[in-house]
């Protein structure tokens, strides 16, 4: 009985820590993005609240919480209220399988630095990322607004198209690590991160991940000049905030997955593992922000053609060639 | 523990499916169906098949239902109106299907001695599952995948563009 209690306590502490750290990180990622974008465009960015604008996220939070929560006329009320939560929750739930570091020993207890090392961890992540589509779809549909609906339709099409190539790009990694468990995948990269062995797979994965994150150059669901603000046009206050934060949590998750699948997870010289993990995740996040500061937006048909006629066949070919090579080198 | 979970999940799956069939609004129906798929996925997990559970969510809830949703949004279907008359012709399939399923279940429990014993507890790791699927049942898997290929080619043929008339779509 005591053992079960201790295990439960450890899990709850881990969950609390992860929520606290990731939500804070997401809030400061917003600030970081605004600052970095501003510097790229020769501006200062937010610098009024606290030293270097460090308290800007707190000010934003207070603003969002005190704003009126508007529900437009003719909206499907329950789904409208439910959709932002869905977007944030599906993003947060993926964190359960992310291994932040190797198993460590605290007070004689073996504590793995992951909430739950599922033996289907990769599929759990893919499943949740395919469910994240519902947040956007329902949010846009329930708003009873043409712009939001159009954005939702775009978002749906984009996400399900690029999920395919993302899933296919993970296949060579699973074949190399011989496991669906994220911890095993990181362990398999102890000597060499997979990005050096599978550079083309990494490229396919990274492009798909960029499309999954719905950011420039793939931010068709919220293209301002055509769709006002996309699927969350009708949202205000904290419900808009949930969509917004969900997007940044999603960025952290996708960064974590890129780190786990290709950049060697927590492995690195000298510094403690958790530091390496965070460093790599933030590095990927920085590249996302950098891309946003640099690239123009795709046109919608270009996006779909690229996804289905270029990325998908290449990803399939990659799986076949890599798999064939693996079988051949094993002598089977 | 597993038995209690089984009954809770079955109740959720059945309720959600019933609600799905009776909703007038197609989007609401889809949401309930997704709930049912979730309950089913968890049932598979409880029964020791985590891989099938994950596929249930990825393929059914995450891909097929999203496609349904996509089409409903594109067509902007209004909630369907009450049909006049013809109550029996609409109820008949429901009654027939229910009777068939009930009859089959009863037949299994009554006449097959193995039906009462329940499934032996087994936990299929992804490795075991893949091995069984692609070693022992490789031929069946290939046949099924060929069917999918036929369906894809058929769909392409049906939706082909007529080049002579010019213009796409």
Image (cartoon, rainbow, N blue to C red):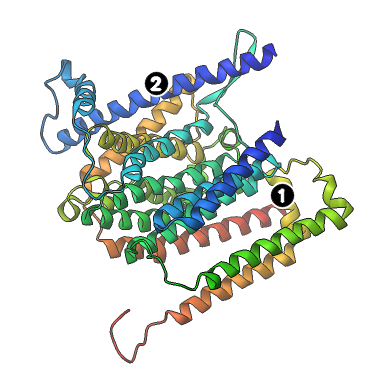
Residue at the limit of the structure toward the top, as seen here: A107
Which SS class for mark 2? Answer: helix
Q: Place residue B8 in its image quadrant.
A: top right
Q: Quadrant of the C terminus of chain B?
A: bottom left
In the rendered structure, the answer to whether residue A319 lies left or right of residue A222 reads: right
In the rendered structure, the answer to whether residue B89 lies left or right of residue A30 reads: right
Q: Which numbered disc covers residue A228? A: none
Q: What residue is pinned by disc 2?
A: A20
In the rendered structure, the answer to whether residue A169 lies left or right of residue A108 reads: left
- C-alpha span from label 2 to label 1: 38 Å
How far from the left and from the top, in percent, is residue A232?
Answer: 25, 45
Instruction: Name the one closer to the observer, A145 or A43.
Output: A145
Instruction: Name the one closer to the observer, A200 or A38.
Output: A38
Residue A172 in view: no
Q: Which numbered disc covers residue B129? A: 1
Badge 2: residue crowd in 10 Å (few <14, some 14–19, many ≥20):
few
């Amino acid at each position: 009985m005591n053992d079960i209690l201790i295990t439960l306590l450890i899990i709850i502490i881990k969950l609390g820590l992860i929520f606290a750290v990731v939500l804070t990180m997401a809030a400061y990622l917003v600030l970081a993005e605004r600052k970095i974008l501003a510097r790229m465009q020769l501006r200062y960015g937010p610098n009024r609240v606290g030293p270097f604008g460090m308290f800007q996220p707190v000010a934003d939070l207070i603003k969002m919480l005190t704003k009126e929560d508007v529900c437009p006329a003719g909206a499907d009320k329950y789904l409208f209220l439910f959709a932002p939560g869905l977007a944030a929750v599906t993003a947060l739930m993926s964190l359960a399988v992310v291994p932040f570091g190797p198993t460590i020993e605290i007070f004689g207890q073996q504590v793995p630095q992951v909430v739950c090392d599922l033996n289907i961890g990769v599929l759990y992540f893919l499943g949740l990322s395919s469910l994240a589509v519902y947040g956007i779809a329902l949010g846009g549909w329930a708003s009873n607004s043409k712009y939001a609906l159009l954005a939702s339709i775009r978002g749906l099409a984009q996400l399900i198209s690029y999920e395919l190539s993302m899933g296919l790009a993970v296949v060579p990694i699973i074949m190399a690590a011989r496991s669906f468990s994220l911890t095993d995948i990181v362990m398999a990269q102890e000597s060499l991160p997979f990005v050096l062995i599978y550079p083309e797979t990494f490229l396919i994965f990274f492009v798909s991940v960029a499309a999954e994150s719905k950011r420039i150059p793939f931010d068709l669901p919220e293209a301002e000049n055509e769709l006002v603000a996309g699927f969350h046009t009708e949202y205000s206050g904290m419900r808009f905030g949930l969509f917004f934060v969900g997007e940044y949590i999603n960025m952290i998750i996708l960064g974590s997955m890129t780190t786990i699948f290709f950049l060697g997870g927590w492995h690195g010289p000298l510094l403690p593992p958790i530091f390496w993990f965070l460093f790599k995740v933030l590095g990927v996040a920085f590249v996302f922000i950098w891309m946003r500061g640099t690239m123009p937006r795709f046109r919608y048909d270009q996006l779909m053609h690229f996804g289905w006629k270029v990325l998908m066949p290449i990803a399939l070919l990659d799986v076949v060639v890599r798999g064939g090579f693996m079988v051949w080198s094993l002598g089977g | 523990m597993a038995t209690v979970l089984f009954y809770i999940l079955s109740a959720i799956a059945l309720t959600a499916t019933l609600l799905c069939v009776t909703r007038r609004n197609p989007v609401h129906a889809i949401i309930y169906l997704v709930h049912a798929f979730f309950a089913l996925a968890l049932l598979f997990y409880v029964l020791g098949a985590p891989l099938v559970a994950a596929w249930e969510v990825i393929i059914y809830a995450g891909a097929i239902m999203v496609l349904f949703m996509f089409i409903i949004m594109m067509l902007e279907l209004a909630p369907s109106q009450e049909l006049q008359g013809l109550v029996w012709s609409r109820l008949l399939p429901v009654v027939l299907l229910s009777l068939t399923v009930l009859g089959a279940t009863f037949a299994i429990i009554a006449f097959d001695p193995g039906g009462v014993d329940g499934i032996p507890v087994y936990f299929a790791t992804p490795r075991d599952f893949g091995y069984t699927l692609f070693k022992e049942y490789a031929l069946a898997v290939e046949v099924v995948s060929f069917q999918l290929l036929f369906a894809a080619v058929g769909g392409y043929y049906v939706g082909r563009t007529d080049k002579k008339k010019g213009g796409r779509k």
